[in-house]
Image: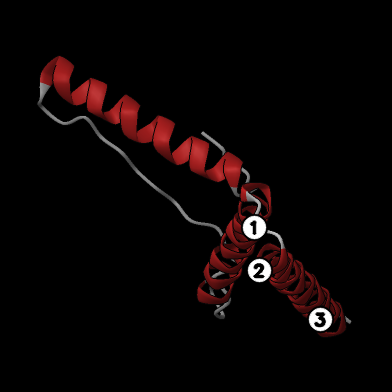
Amino acid sequence: MRNLDDVKEQLDLLGKWQSLISDANASLDLFALDPDEDLIKESQIGLDILKENLDRWELQRLLSGEYDKGNAVISINAGAGGTDAQDWVEILFRMYSRWSDAHSMKLTI
């Protein structure tokens, strides 16, 4: 059943992308008839959304292997670097925790 849901999701994405492309093309066609900077901006916004969606899709495809659905363990140690090393560990932790939040992944400390 999961495979069917995946295929439906992929088809929905393709439909969304086709819609974004046709909207951008329509804006460019209107711009050819009546040059207006707002039409170019509208077209650019649609293309930016499309690029963001394609980048997210590419990452999902890269992480779709047999073991990619499993958990990951990350260990960050300051070592003997003193305060600077501790600060660096905090920066790394914050970076990884924000990334996991942005990608709707669960983080356990």
Q: Secondary structure at mark 3?
A: helix
Dot 1, crowdedness within 10 Å: few (<14), some or many (≥20)? few
Q: Amino acid at mark 1?
A: Pro
Q: Residue furthest top?
A: 83
Residue at 43% over, 40% down: 96
Q: Residue at x 61, y 62 (%)?
A: 47
Q: Amino acid at mark 3?
A: Leu
Q: Which one is in front, 53 or 72? A: 53
Query: Of 83 and 11, which appears nearest the observer?
Result: 11
Would you call the spot at circle 2 few (<14 residues within 10 Å), some (14-19), or many (20 or more)?
few
| Residue 87 image position (x, y, % from top left) | 25, 21
Q: Which residue is mark 1?
A: 35
Neighbour tally class for label 3: few under 14, some 14-19, many 20 plus, Cα within 10 Å: few
Secondary structure of residue under mark 2: helix
Provide residue 43's location: percent of width, then percent of height: 65, 59
Quick check: 80 above or below 38?
Answer: above
Q: Which residue is mark 3?
A: 11
Q: Indicate which label's residue lies in the foreground, 3 or 1.
A: 1
Give me the C-alpha separation between circle 3 and circle 1. Answer: 35 Å
Quadrant of the image occupied by residue 106? top right
- Where the N terminus falls, by quadrant? bottom right
Residue topped by disc 2: 32
Identify the image quadrant of residue 56: bottom right
Q: Earlier in the sequence, mark 3 or mark 1?
A: 3
